Image (cartoon, rainbow, N blue to C red):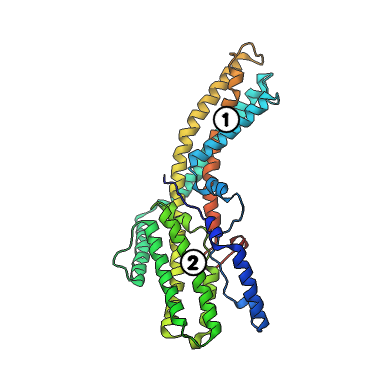
C-alpha cells in the first residue's frame, strides 16, 4: 500500500493568506469607490481548508503517515498512559475480577468490531462486483472519458498513471489560462484585463503548486488524490462565467474558446479526482480488511489467554504468576490493537471523503474555512 510524501495543507502556506487578504481588501475598496459591485469580483476558490500551526503533525496523522505507524503510535501512547496510571496506583491491580471483566468486555467488543467492520467493507466493495453489462458500461465510460480528454488536449496517448494523467490535465488548463491572459493584454477595457488577470494569475499559481506536489508523490491513486484535496474550483468556474457574460461583446473568438477550454479542463480535473477517490476507497478498504484480520486474531488470542489465566485464580492474587500484574498494561494495549487500526484507517478515509465532498460546481462553508 503506497504512502504519499506530500501534503495539501502546504498549499495554504504557499498562497500567503495574509498578503492575499490584504490585497483583496484593497482591491474591493477601490472597486467599491468606483461604484462596482464587490461581490462580482473574481475570487479565489482553489485553496486549502485547514489552518493551524500544527499542520505538519496533523497532516501526517490524517494523510501522509503510514497507517501501521499511526496505529502503533496510538498503541504506544495507550501503553505509556496505562503504565503511568498504574505506577501512581490509579489502575493498580488489587482484585483481578475487575480486570477480568474488562478483558471480557474487550474480547466481545473486538469480535463485534471486526465482524461489523468487515461486513461494512464487504458491502462497499460489493459495488465493484456486477454483471457483464455493468462492468462493460464502467469500462466504456472510463474509456470514453480518456479518449475525449485526449482529443481535447491534443495528446497522442493518455498516461495510464493517475498522477501523470492529472498532471497532463492541469498543464492543459494552465496553457489555456496563459492563452487567455495573453489574448486579453490588448483589450481596451481595463476592467476586463484586471478580471482576467486575477483569474489567470491565481489559477496558474495554484496549478503550479499542485504539479509540484504531484512531482513529490508516487504514481499511485492516493498520491494523485492527495495532491488535489486542497482544490475547489467552484469560484474559478463562476469567475470564468462572469467574464463570459459581462464582457461577451468584447471577447475575441480565441479568448472565448480559451475560456470554454478552461471550464472543460476544470470539470475534467474534478471528474478525475472523484474517480480516483472511488478507486482509493476501494483499495484502502480492501487493505484495511486484511490488516484488521492480521491484527485482530492475535489480539483476541492473547486477550482470551490472559482472561483464562485470571479466571483460574478466582479473585485472589496468590494463584497468579507474579509477572502477570506487570503484564496488564501490555495485555490492555494488545486488546486495543483492532480499535487502533480502525482509527488509523478510517480517519484517513474520512479526511479524503470530507475534502472531496463538493463537486466543482458547488462549494461549502467548510471548503472556504
Viewer-proximal residue among 117 and 333: 333
**Which residue is at 62% across, 75% downward?**
27
Q: Is residue 143 left or right of residue 201?
A: left
Q: Is residue 174 visible?
A: yes
Q: Residues within 10 Å of mark 1 (few under 14, many from 20)?
A: many
**Which residue is at 63% across, 31% downward?**
81
Mark 1 vs mark 2, CA separation in Å = 47 Å
Q: Is residue 45 left or right of residue 149?
A: right
Write down the residue under mark 2.
205
Count of number-bearing discs: 2
Residue 121: x and y in percent read: 48, 45
Residue 333 shows which numbered tag?
A: 1
Q: Is residue 174 above or below residue 283?
A: below
Tell me the element at label 1: helix
**Res 151 quadrant in image:** bottom left
Label whose residue precedes the other's in the sequence (1 or 2): 2
Tell me the element at label 2: helix
Q: Quadrant location of the N terminus? A: top left
Viewer-proximal residue among 287 and 234: 234
Q: Quadrant location of the C terminus? A: bottom right
Residue 98: x and y in percent read: 67, 23
Residue 12: x and y in percent read: 56, 59
Viewer-proximal residue among 198 and 287: 198
Q: Residue furthest left?
A: 156
Q: Is residue 154 left or right of residue 102?
A: left
**Which residue is at 64% across, 80% downward?**
31
Amino acid at each position: 500500500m503506497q504512502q504519499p510524501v506530500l501534503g495539501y495543507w502546504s498549499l495554504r502556506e504557499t498562497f500567503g493568506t495574509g498578503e492575499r487578504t490584504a490585497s483583496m481588501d484593497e482591491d474591493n475598496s477601490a472597486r467599491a469607490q468606483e461604484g462596482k459591485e464587490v461581490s462580482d469580483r473574481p475570487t479565489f476558490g482553489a485553496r486549502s481548508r485547514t489552518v493551524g500551526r500544527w499542520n505538519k503533525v496533523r497532516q501526517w496523522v490524517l494523510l501522509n503517515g503510514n497507517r501501521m505507524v499511526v496505529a502503533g503510535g496510538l498503541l504506544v501512547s495507550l501503553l505509556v498512559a496505562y503504565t503511568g496510571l498504574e505506577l501512581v496506583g490509579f489502575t493498580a491491580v488489587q482484585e483481578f475480577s475487575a480486570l477480568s471483566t474488562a478483558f471480557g468486555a474487550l474480547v466481545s467488543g473486538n469480535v463485534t468490531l471486526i465482524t461489523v467492520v468487515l461486513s461494512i467493507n464487504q458491502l462497499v466493495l460489493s459495488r465493484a462486483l456486477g454483471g457483464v453489462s455493468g462492468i462493460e458500461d464502467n469500462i466504456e465510460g472510463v474509456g470514453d472519458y480518456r479518449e475525449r480528454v485526449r482529443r481535447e488536449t491534443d495528446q497522442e496517448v493518455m498516461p495510464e498513471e493517475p498522477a501523470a494523467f492529472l498532471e497532463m490535465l492541469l498543464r492543459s488548463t494552465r496553457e489555456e489560462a496563459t492563452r487567455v491572459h495573453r489574448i486579453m493584454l490588448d483589450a481596451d477595457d481595463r476592467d476586463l484585463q484586471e478580471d482576467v488577470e486575477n483569474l489567470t494569475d491565481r489559477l496558474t499559481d495554484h496549478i503550479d503548486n499542485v504539479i509540484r506536489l504531484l512531482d513529490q508523490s508516487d504514481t499511485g491513486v492516493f498520491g494523485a488524490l492527495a495532491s488535489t484535496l486542497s482544490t475547489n474550483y467552484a469560484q474559478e468556474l463562476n469567475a470564468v462565467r462572469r467574464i463570459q457574460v459581462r464582457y461577451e461583446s468584447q471577447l475575441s473568438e480565441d479568448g472565448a474558446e480559451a475560456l470554454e477550454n478552461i471550464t472543460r479542463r476544470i470539470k475534467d480535473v474534478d471528474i478525475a479526482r472523484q474517480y480516483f477517490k472511488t478507486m482509493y476507497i476501494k483499495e484502502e478498504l480492501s487493505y484495511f480488511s486484511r490488516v484488521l484480520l492480521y491484527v485482530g486474531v492475535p489480539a483476541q488470542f492473547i486477550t482470551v489467554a490472559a482472561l483464562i489465566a485470571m479466571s483460574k485464580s478466582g479473585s485472589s492474587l496468590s494463584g497468579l504468576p507474579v509477572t502477570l500484574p506487570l503484564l496488564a498494561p501490555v495485555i490492555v494495549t494488545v486488546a486495543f490493537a483492532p480499535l487502533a487500526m480502525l482509527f488509523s484507517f478510517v480517519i484517513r478515509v474520512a479526511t479524503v471523503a470530507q475534502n472531496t465532498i463538493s463537486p466543482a460546481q458547488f462549494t461549502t462553508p467548510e471548503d472556504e474555512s
